[in-house]
Image: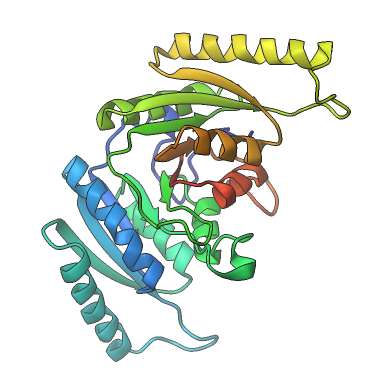
Amino acid sequence: MATHLLPPRPSDSVTTVADHDFNFNRILFPVDFSERCREFAHSVRAMARQFDARVTALHVVEPASGETVSSQLLEQAHERLEAFAELELKGLRTGVGVGTGDPAQCICKYAAEKDCDVIMMPTRGQGVFRRLLLGSVTAKVLHDCVRPVWTGPHKPGDPAGVHIPPQQIVCALNLAPESAAVLRFASDLAKAFGAKLLAAHALMVLPGTPDAGLPDMQLEARQWAERDLADLVARTGSPAATTVVLGETRYAIESVSREQEADLLVIGRTHAEGLLGQLGSKAYGIISHAPCPVLSV
C-alpha cells in the first residue's frame, strides 16, 4: 500500500513526518457548519483536551464565479463562526479565522502559515453516491497538504467521532523504506495515548489461489513479509504487534481494523504525480472504507 512520505513543497515550510517532532499543540478545524461537522467537533474537543492544544476554527467563503465576497458577508461569517466555536469548542483555547477563495487551498495555506500540527476534518460519507467518494474539499486537502490530516469515519451510519484517547491503533504499512517514519509516528502517538498498536501489512492474494491453502509462492511471499515487518518493528524500537493480512489493500486494512476494533488507523500518503497526487489511489481507498478515524501522515 502507498505509504511513501511527502517531500515539503515550496508553498509549505513544514518538514515531513520523517523529521517532524510529534506533537498536537495546534489543531486546525475547518468548519462548514454542516451537521457532520458539528458531530465531528466531539473528536476535536477530545483531542484538544488530550494534548492541551489550541484549536483554530476556520471557515472559508467561496465566492461565486467572477464575483468578490462583500465585507458584510465576511463579517456575518465571522460572527457565525465565533458562535459555533463558543458552542462546540467551549472551554478550550480557541481562535477563529475566515478566508475567501478555494476552500482546500485556503485550508492548506492557513495550516502552513500558522504552523498547525494537524488538520482535523470529517469526510462526507452521506448518501448513495457519497459512500464511494470523499468530500471534494477533504480530498483536495489530503491531495495537497503535507501536514497530518485526521479524518472521521467515511461510511454512512458510522459516527463522526469515536473514543478518544484511542485504545487500539492500527498502522498500515507497505514495507517501503519510508514506512519506518510512519511507524515511528504511530508509535509516538500510541505512547501519547497509552494505546495498543498493531502494525499491519496487506499482501495481495495471487490469482487462482485455492481456498484450501496457499501455493508455495504465496506462502513464501507471506513469510518474507512477516520477517520484513518484524524487522521494521525491531529497527524502529516500536512496541507494535504485527500482522500480515491477505487481500486487496483497502479491504484487508478495513477487515483488520474491524477485527481489532480499532479506534484509529494511521496511514502514509504517497508523493506521486497525476490525478490523485499525494492522496494516492490506495490511501483514497483505505480512507473511503475505514470503519474508524484515519490519521494520514
Query: Residue 204 or 28: which is nearer the viewer?
Result: 204
Residue sitting at x 32%, y 29%? 195
183 relative to 96, above or below: above
Q: Is residue 98 left or right of residue 4?
A: left
Question: Hey, which quadrant is residue 34 in on the image?
Answer: bottom left
77 relative to 159, above or below: below
Locate the N terminus and report the quarter of the image it occupies: top right
171 relative to 126, above or below: above
List x then y, in percent, for residue 62: 45, 78
Residue sitting at x 38%, y 16%? 239
List x then y, in percent, for residue 96: 23, 67
Camera sees residue 295: yes
Q: How many marks?
A: 0
Query: Residue 259 or 182: which is nearer the viewer?
Result: 259
Q: Residue furthest front?
A: 212
Question: Hey, which quadrant is residue 244 in on the image?
Answer: top right
Q: Is residue 88 left or right of residue 98?
A: left
Q: Is residue 226 left or right of residue 154?
A: right
List x then y, in percent, for residue 280: 63, 45
Question: Hey, which quadrant is residue 229 in on the image?
Answer: top right
Camera sees residue 30: no
Query: Residue 162 or 173: which is nearer the viewer?
Result: 162
